[in-house]
Image (tube, rainbow, N blue to C red):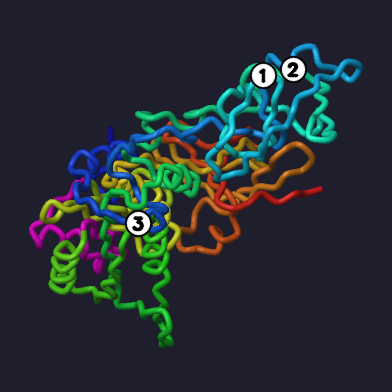
Amino acid sequence: MSIRERGFKRLVKVGDALNMLLSKVSRKDAIERVSLLDAIGRVLAEDIVAEEDIPCFNRSAVDGYAVRSRDTFGASHVNPVKLKVVGRVDVGETPSISVSEGEAVEIATGAVIPDGADAVVMYEDVKAVDGEIDVFKPVTPLENVSLKGEDVKKGEVVARKGLILRPWDIGVLASLNIPYVNVVAKVKVAVFSTGNELVEVGERPPPGKLVNSTKSLVLTAVKELGCETLDLGLVPDDVEKIVERMREGVNVADVLITTGGTSIGKRDYVREALEKAGGSILAHGIAMKPGKPTGLGLLEGKPVIMLSGYPVAALVGFEAFIKPLIYHMLGAQEQPRAVIKARLTRRVASTPGTRSYLRVFVEKRGDVFYAEPLRLTGSGVLSSVVKANGIVIIPEHRDGFDEGEEVYVQLIRPVEEGF
């Protein structure tokens, strides 16, 4: 399930490498109890079962008059039915009156249906005159009535364990009067970069040095997944110092991510440092482009993801391994991106056996989407991601896509309208 390439003992396919990683990492079992408003974006740690019906009473779905439906049968504009109005029920009130034969009770939307009534006639279908109404249109039993338990029934599972809570989920839980929920504890992720050539953001780089953009990219990408992040800074190209920082990282975090030093150059020490720290390598050298030098390992039973120092390659490694790893640890289903079909504006090539991640700019012209490839190579060209609004994955069994071929595009930004 791997292919050989000069410089690496083997290149492991993306799917195989991910399966190896996930098989070695357990899900988090730590649970936190948080207020409902603080639960947005968190992963539910238990099934939520409704303890009551919502609504807990039959209520009017419209403004009008609560009636006995059989009293309205045969009503028309030519032959209206007269009913005596015996009271009114507003929202939030408990009715103190009931509806008997030949009677009606004025009622507001959402108010409790009074005893005796089984339907509501809308204002538009009646004419009120001197304490009576003329009904011009018949109603059937339960017409314009929201029944008890129509929204949620008692005993119903309204939210399942592993659900990532969104605003509409919060609204349902609020309707059930649930002020606190149990959620999976956040995954703690520590990140550090290696490289003598790097300086931190905000520092002025002297000639020959670069600002470290990759660490900021990774930290914020992880934070966007709802993780707690720990910035462990920059480490020079020194095996012992990298070992020390790795041990610090796994002591304070659930996941350790490194950027830089993952290739096979003379100063690429991250793999060596992981093994010297007592860790193990699951895969080093992935059959993907960009991001081939990505490495996966374990240290003290915790996952260590070794990303390229080049920002685009690191981003691809994040998408391929870190995102599914975090969702796996949280026991949640990965949130899919919107996918559309688009026609490629030119041919793109790929190496068979390698999964390629192609950055594209998608534009809609008339009723057709077109995808313009921005750059297939150049893992350090971060601007190609900023300019892109979609990603096309070229699978391992393809040697590329032809011009005009329809491809699936994962959208990362809105699509622009062309002419």
Residue drawn at x 16%, y 70% is 239
Q: Nearer the viewer, mark 1 or mark 2?
A: 1
Q: Is residue 291 visible?
A: no
Is 308 situated left or right of 23 in this image?
right
Q: Nearer the viewer, residue 329 or 5?
A: 329
- How crowded is the residue under tag 1: few (<14 C-alpha within 10 Å), some, or many (20+)? few
Q: Please state which of the two labelled residues, at mark 3 or mark 2, is closer to the viewer.
A: 2
Vertical side of 316 occupied by 97: above or below: above
Q: Is residue 257 magenta?
A: yes
> Which of pointers 3 and 2 lies earlier in the amino acid sequence?
3
Residue 118 among magenta residues: no
Q: Mark 2 = which residue?
A: 72
At x 49%, y 29%, the residue is 148
Instruction: Give the distance between the C-alpha atoms of the residues marked 3 and 1, in whole angstroms.
Output: 49 Å
Range shown magenta? 254-282
Q: Earlier in the sequence, mark 1 or mark 2?
A: 2
Can you give x and y, in whole percent of width and height, for residue 288 in the image? 39, 45
Q: Earlier in the sequence, mark 3 or mark 1?
A: 3
Q: Which residue is mark 3?
A: 35
- In 3D space, how far apart are the residues under numbered discs 1 and 2 (Cα atoms)? 11 Å
Q: Nearer the viewer, mark 3 or mark 1?
A: 1
